[in-house]
Amino acid sequence: MNLIDNHRMCNTFTLKNEDGLSFVKETEDRMKIRTVEMAKLDVNKPLEEMNEQEKMIYYFLNCHKGIEDSKIKVMIESDGVIQMLEKRVETISDDGWKKIIADFQKLHENEERMERQLELEEAHKAQEEAKKALQEANKLNQEADKKVEEAEKKSEEADKKVEEANKQVKQMVCKMYEDGFSLEQISAYCSLNVDEIQVLIKS
């Protein structure tokens, strides 16, 4: 997949605004962006037809093959810049590559360890928050139970008061009836109808 929609491997871009005005003067190339798309290189192109950029890119893509690649062999034998690059590549021994790989693996392991530590801390935090929420819920339940108990106690006290009042009314009605008051007189005095008075007298 090509990054830039053209056939050029090397492209240069400048910073411009919506109206096409350059951020800096065109001569100040330090603000330019250059891209190199190695995938656009025609690796089957004859070496003698490649320009310097194509040769360099081909080398970077195939230097691991060494002189087994005929083009790489010719470039190493004839190109001074490639010879210098080849010496730099050769200075990295197998042990050096192993160390680079080991360092990368260690870095990756450290990153994974940090991620696990963060996940553990997040889980512990969530556990603490859940524990706190449970404690709050238990506290609310206890307060609700206490209010229910208080309401039941008040209801019992109210029932006792009603029962005591009914008992006193009954005693008064029976006393008045024994003293010769008529049912109508007792009804007017106690605000009870005759039927209620008769029930109290007979009970």
Image: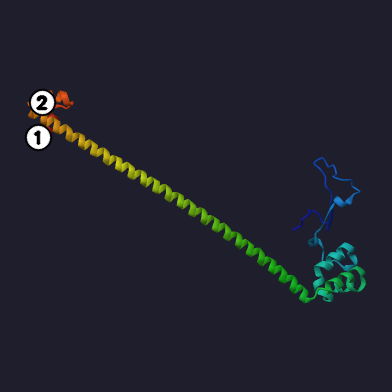
The one of 194 and 18 positioned closer to us in this rendering:
194
First reached walking from the N terminus: tag 2 or tag 1: 2
Q: Label 2 is placed on what type of residue?
A: Leu
**In terms of secondary structure, where does tag 2 sit?**
helix
Mark number for residue 183? 2
**Residue drawn at the location 80% of the way across and 59% of the way down:** 37
Which of these two is toward me, 97 or 35?
A: 97
Drawn side of residue 82 relative to residue 136, left or right: right
Residue at the image point whose x is 84% and y is 64% from the top: 57
Secondary structure under the numbered disc 1 in the rendered image? helix
Q: Quadrant of the N terminus?
A: bottom right
Does residue 71 appear in the picture of this structure?
Answer: no
Q: Residues within 10 Å of mark 2 (few under 14, many from 20)?
A: some
Residue at (30%, 40%) from the top-left corner? Answer: 154
Q: Is residue 139 visible?
A: yes
Q: Which mark is residue 202?
A: 1
Which amino acid, by three-letter code, is at mark 1?
Answer: Lys
User: Which color scheme is applied?
Assistant: rainbow
Residue 10 appears at what percent x and percent y? 84, 57
Percent of width and height locating residue 179: 8, 27
Report crowding for label 1: few under 14, some 14 to 19, many 20 or more residues within 10 A (C-alpha).
Answer: few
Q: Quadrant of residue 100?
A: bottom right
